[in-house]
Image (spheres, coloured by chain):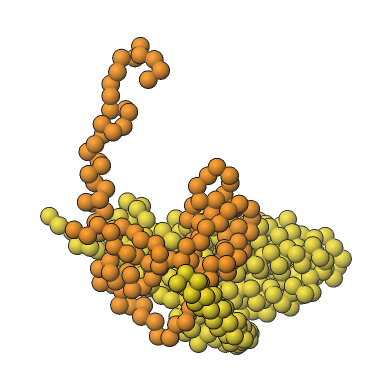
Amino acid sequence: MQLIKQFFYGDYDAMKVAGNPADAAATPSVATQEWPIWEVFVRSKQGLDHKHVGSLHAADAAMAIENARDVYTRRQEGISIWVVESKYIHATNPDEAESLYEPAADKVYRHPTFYELPIELKHI
Amino acid sequence: MSYTPEQQFQHKIDQEIKIEPKDWMPEKYRQTLIRQISQHAHSEVVGMLPEGNWISRAPSLKRKAILLAKVQDEAGHGLYLYSAAETLGITRDEMYHQLHTGKAKYSSIFNYPTLTWADMGAIGWLVDGAAIMNQVPLCRTSYGPYARAMVRVCKEESFHQRQGFEILLVLSQGTDEQKAMCQDAINRWWWPSVMMFGPADEASPHTQQSMQWKIKRFTNDELRQKFVDICAEQVKTLGMTLPDPDLKWNEEKGHYDFGAINWEEFWQVVAGNGPCNKERLATRQKAWNDGAWVRDAATAHAAKKAAKHLHKVA
């Protein structure tokens, strides 16, 4: 079983790999010379993780960061930006979600609430 | 017992589970979303043009800075929405192509001219007000990337409406000429704004399916009624009137009754015969064509830099 497949977020060909038969529809009718797509991650304040906020087109990384600043942080939403060209994002396949994530469902003993202990026990 | 992909899909929708780009979805769902989201994006982008008309003629530096910020937001909203549509498998260039060739529609409201400064107020209050009415339920739409884009749009849109109302408020407390200008703008923008909600429910063939898929949460007429009810009250604060002799509170229904909509005008503007359809499209085409050398130069620069980097690594 192949667990990891490559998906280009927003990329059409990659979605075909996902086995979605619906994809034939949006075949472009114009030859495209688009700037590549970049995924944008913003740290909203010191101490928090960078979070995915969206994507944009840019010719290179410097332009992607400049555009991300203008598009995603016009109201002080961030203090740090990461950009990654979308084609470098690898993701799991939703069709395999069951085999990937279900095994965790029956392992309730991984949570502290699984263990019933006397009430008088403190600090545990 | 096994379910068809369609049944599983509908089941997710019914349970309010969002659909994400890589999930299976019916072809019709994908196409409906591509059409709706790209039209929405085009509307944001073309929507910059009527207001852009007044940036250089804003009555004060403060108003100019505000208008610039608003127009910049609209560019941003277009970008959020284009990105959301791209997750469905259409390219940005294809969407631009559809816009520039007239194949794709955008909101008809932007085919009306902005004749006076008061139009900036009326657009903010009425046009953005109607847009917000449409957009707030879309924050809960079933397609994840669209819903997330709308959350961001709605956060920013509220300033647009408030600044518009404030422009009108200031005018409504001004000289007789300013008051007349205020009323005139309301008169011209009211009906096109009421039409922004689209055809009446019985003339809107996609509504039922879109409601079932929870792309839409309310019908066109439901949202339109809500908009009329709210504006009929808000206009009192301005001491102005809405240009509808049939506008009357209906105690029994708990809503305002309002006059018949001129659907002939609506369909004429949709068909491309509004006052500014040709001008708007020509402006977009010119911007795209004039920008070609910039796009090419940036691509060439990036390629050159990448090659240099490769050389250094080797």
Q: Position of residue B162 (x, y in %)?
A: 68, 57
Residue at the farthest top position: A120
Percent across and percent down for residue B77 are 56, 66
Which residue in the rendered view is the most extreme toward the right? B175
Q: Which chain is yellow?
A: B
Shown in orange, the chain is A
Observer-nearest of B1 and A60: A60
Q: Is residue A1 toward the left or the right of residue B226 in the image?
A: left
Q: Residue at x 49, y 52 (%)?
A: A51
Q: Whole-percent x and y of residue B298?
A: 57, 78
Quarter of image, res A11 = bottom left
Q: Residue at x 34, y 59 (%)?
A: A91
Image quarter where the N terminus of chain A lies is bottom left
Which residue is depicted at the point 36% across and 73% down?
A12
Q: State the image quarter where residue B244 is shown.
A: bottom right
> Residue at the location (73% across, 55% down)?
B237
Residue A17, how many percent across, how many down? Answer: 28, 69
- In the figure, B141 relative to B270: above or below? above
Q: Is residue B252 left or right of residue B28?
A: right
Is residue B221 in sight in this rendering? no
Q: Pick the quarter of the image with the C terminus of chain A.
A: top left
Q: Please, which residue is most extreme toward the left here?
A: B1
**Front position in the image: A5 or B194:** A5
Indicate whether A47 appears above or below A60.
Answer: above
